[in-house]
Amino acid sequence: MFSKEVLDIFSNPVNAGRIKKPDAVEDLFNPNKTAHIEFSMRIENGLIKDCKFRAQAEPDIIAICDTVAGSIVNKPANMILVDATSIAKSLNVDVEDVRFCIDCAVATLQEYKNKLMKEKNKKAE
C-alpha cells in the first residue's frame, strides 16, 4: 500500500519531535485524512535553523512531514519554497497530501511573523 520510500522514512523519521523553546508552533487538522500535524521551528538571523514535526497520521503523511521539515532547514524564513510535485513523485504519494503538509509549515512561519509584528507594535506603543 505504501511505497518503500514512505516506509523507510516512516520507520526512521529524522525530523520528528518538538523543538524546545521554539520561535513558532502551529498545528493543523485535516479531517479528510484524519491527520493532525504540528510543526515547530527555531529561526535565527532570518533563517529556519531547525524544524520538527509531530503527527497523528498515516505513514505517508508522516513521511511527507519529515521530508518537508528537512527541506526547509537553513532556508530563508520569509517564505517556504518547496516543490510539492517533486516530493510527491519521490515518495509516490498524492500531491494534495504534500500540499497539506507544506500548508502547515507555512502556517507556522505565519505564526512567527504575527508574533514579530505584535512585538514590534508593542515597542511602538
Image: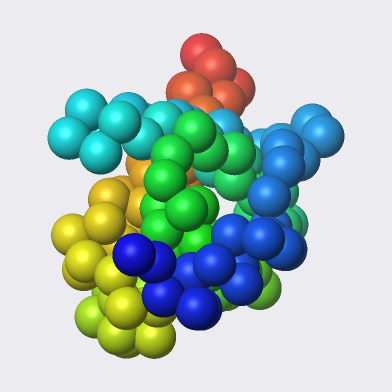
Q: Is residue 30 left or right of residue 47?
A: left
* Percent position of residue 123, x then y: 59, 22
* Percent position of residue 87, x then y: 37, 78
- Furthest residue in direction front, as rendered: 1
- Furthest residue in direction top, as rendered: 125
Q: How many dots with numbers?
A: 0
* Percent position of residue 60, x then y: 41, 58
Which residue appears at 42% of the width and 46% of the height?
58
The image quarter in which residue 82 lies:
bottom left
Q: Is residue 86 left or right of residue 27?
A: left
Colour setting: rainbow
Q: Quadrant of the N terminus?
A: bottom left
Whether residue 72 is visible, yes or no, is no
* Percent position of residue 28, x then y: 36, 31
Q: In the picture shown, does residue 37 fall above or below 69?
A: above
Which residue appears at 22% of the width and 66% of the height?
94
Q: In the picture shown, does residue 17 fall above or below 118?
A: below
Which residue appears at 68% of the width and 50% of the height?
16
Looking at the picture, tell me which residue is in the foreground, 25 or 77.
25
The image quarter in which residue 7 lies:
bottom right
Which residue appears at 41% of the width and 75% of the height?
3
Looking at the picture, tell me which residue is in the foreground, 115 or 22.
22
Whether residue 17 is visible, yes or no, is yes
Q: In the picture shown, does residue 5 fall above or below 117?
A: below
